[in-house]
Image (cartoon, rainbow, N blue to C red):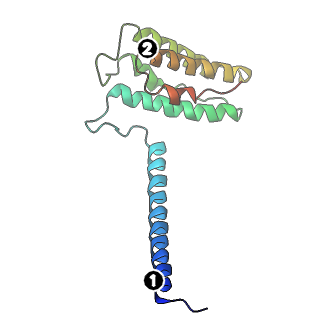
Amino acid sequence: MVLSLKNKITVFSFLIVFILLLANCSGNSDKVQSEQSDKKEDCSKPLNPNGDSELALLMRKMMHTSESLKEMIKQGNLPKEFPEEFLKIHTAQPTDSETKKESFDAFASNYISNMKLLFESPKDELTKNYNAVITSCVSCHSEHCPGPLKAINKLKINE
């Protein structure tokens, strides 16, 4: 089969476009994988161009810890040590001073007490007590900062 010059140019053009698209896609997947692993490894990296507040960074650590706890509990493992740095929730400075309303400290105390209970839980109550921690996060974020609610709700373990 003999291709005309016009057909040869068309086939050649399609090959070049295909190769360029393939090269572009593979380069992007490496970049995306790198960005995802960076996020998992360092939850304290600032997301704000002007830097993140002490409270925002603490909340990110709480989220990361909750993700880890979820996996541990699903595997039937007991959590080891209560993260003492979470006690800073009462004093951590928010990005916006309006974020911490009068009810914030009550929500924070509820979170801390549920978290401590989780770390003292017998194995058969881990899921229930873990979900109580997540529910306390949902309660607070419903009133104070609703942005991360969708992500927080994904942390729940189906009983």
Marks 2/1 in contact by CB < 8 Å: the verdict is no
The answer to whether residue 39 shows anywhere in this view is yes
Specify whether 126 is left or right of 155: right
| Residue type, mark 2 in image | Glu
Quarter holding residue 57: top left
Query: Label 2, on which residue?
Result: 143
Residue at image position (62%, 31%) is: 70
Count of labels shown? 2
- Counting from the top left corner in percent of width and height, residue 147 is at 43, 26
Sequence-earlier tag: 2 or 1: 1
Q: CA distance from mark 2 to mark 1?
A: 63 Å
- Counting from the top left corner in percent of width and height, residue 96 is at 29, 22
Compared to 74, does 86 lie above or below? above
In the depicted view, which residue is nearer to us: 24 or 86? 24
Quarter holding residue 87: top left
Query: Label 1, on which residue?
Result: 9
In the depicted view, which residue is nearer to us: 41 or 95? 95
Q: Which numbered circle lies on residue 79?
A: none
How would you rate the neighbour count of disc 2 (Cα within 10 Å): few for under 14, some for 14-19, many for 20 or more? some
The answer to whether residue 120 shows anywhere in this view is no
**SS at circle 2:** helix
| Residue type, mark 1 in image | Ile
Of the two numbered discs 2 and 1 in the rendering, the one whose residue sits closer to the viewer: 1
How would you rate the neighbour count of disc 1 (Cα within 10 Å): few for under 14, some for 14-19, many for 20 or more? few
Residue at image position (41%, 10%) is: 105
Residue at image position (67%, 19%) is: 128
**SS at circle 1:** helix
- Counting from the top left corner in percent of width and height, residue 117 is at 60, 16
Image quadrant occupied by the N terminus: bottom right
Residue at image position (52%, 19%) is: 138
Compared to 37, does 50 lie above or below? above
The residue lying furthest to the bottom in this view is: 2
